[in-house]
Image (tube, rainbow, N blue to C red):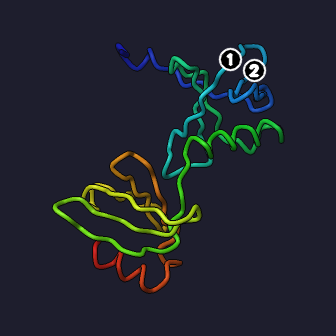
Amino acid sequence: MLDDESDFKLKFLEPEKVMFFRAGDALRVTIEGDRSCLRVVPMRAFPISMRDTYISLRDMAGNELGMIRDPDELDKDSRKLLKDEIRKRYFTPAIRRIKSLQDKFGIVEWEVETDRGVRKFMTRSLHDSLNETEGGFIITDLENNRYEIRNRSELDPRSAAILARKI
């Protein structure tokens, strides 16, 4: 627990000093002049609003090694490894079409077509499960899986009407 603000120091990492490596399924990192970590966990600091910037690197104990402002500033190989790991960690199927949306006793049953196929899932009330993004929504189901409507104006008319009736 932090006693005061002086206990917390955010450390931004210099992209030219950060190198990622893959060892089996583990993502490893070496921070030149500082340390190496045999298994690093990248986490978005702002997973909804700034998903491609401000990536926190943590060791397996949850201790922060530092923050990468913009992964695009990393060397090509490290950038690819980091982005692949983030994509796996934040797997979020994109909803292309809403087939049905039914509210039953405070639980909403969804049947959707995503970029990963047809999915059925349940959420609490829509207001508790929807987070608005620029033009769309992130939907969190009862098992904490996330789905995304990237741009609601790109939904087909039937899907848009189903969604509009419920929100």
Residue holding disc 1: 37
User: Could you tell whether 134 is left or right of 107 in the image?
Assistant: right
User: Could you tell whether 141 is left or right of 59 in the image?
Assistant: left
Residue 165 versus residue 21 in the image, above or below: below
Q: Is 99 or 73 nearer to us in this picture?
A: 99
Residue 100 at x, y percent in the picture: 36, 74
Q: CA distance from mark 2 to mark 1?
A: 6 Å
Tell me the amino acid under the disc marked 2. Answer: Thr
Q: Residue at x 39, y 45 (%)?
A: 144
Residue 89 versus residue 159 in the image, above or below: above
Q: Quadrant of residue 20?
A: top right
Residue 81 versus residue 66 in the image, above or below: below
Residue 39 versus residue 107 in the image, above or below: above
Cβ–Cβ under 8 Å for marks 2 and 1: yes
- Location of the C terminus by quadrant is bottom left
Q: Which mark is residue 83?
A: none
Residue 49 at x, y percent in the picture: 50, 52
Q: Sequence-wise, which precedes: disc 2 or disc 1?
A: 2
Residue 21 at x, y percent in the picture: 78, 28
Q: Secondary structure at mark 1?
A: strand
Q: Which mark is residue 30?
A: 2
Q: Number of marks in the image?
A: 2
- Location of the N terminus by quadrant is top left
Q: Residue at x 32, y 71 (%)?
A: 101
Furthest-right residue in view?
76
Q: Residue at x 51, y 17 (%)?
A: 61
Q: Is 53 or 78 nearer to us in this picture?
A: 78
User: Could you tell whether 20 is left or right of 5 in the image?
Assistant: right
Tell me the amino acid under the disc marked 1. Answer: Cys
Q: Secondary structure at mark 2?
A: strand
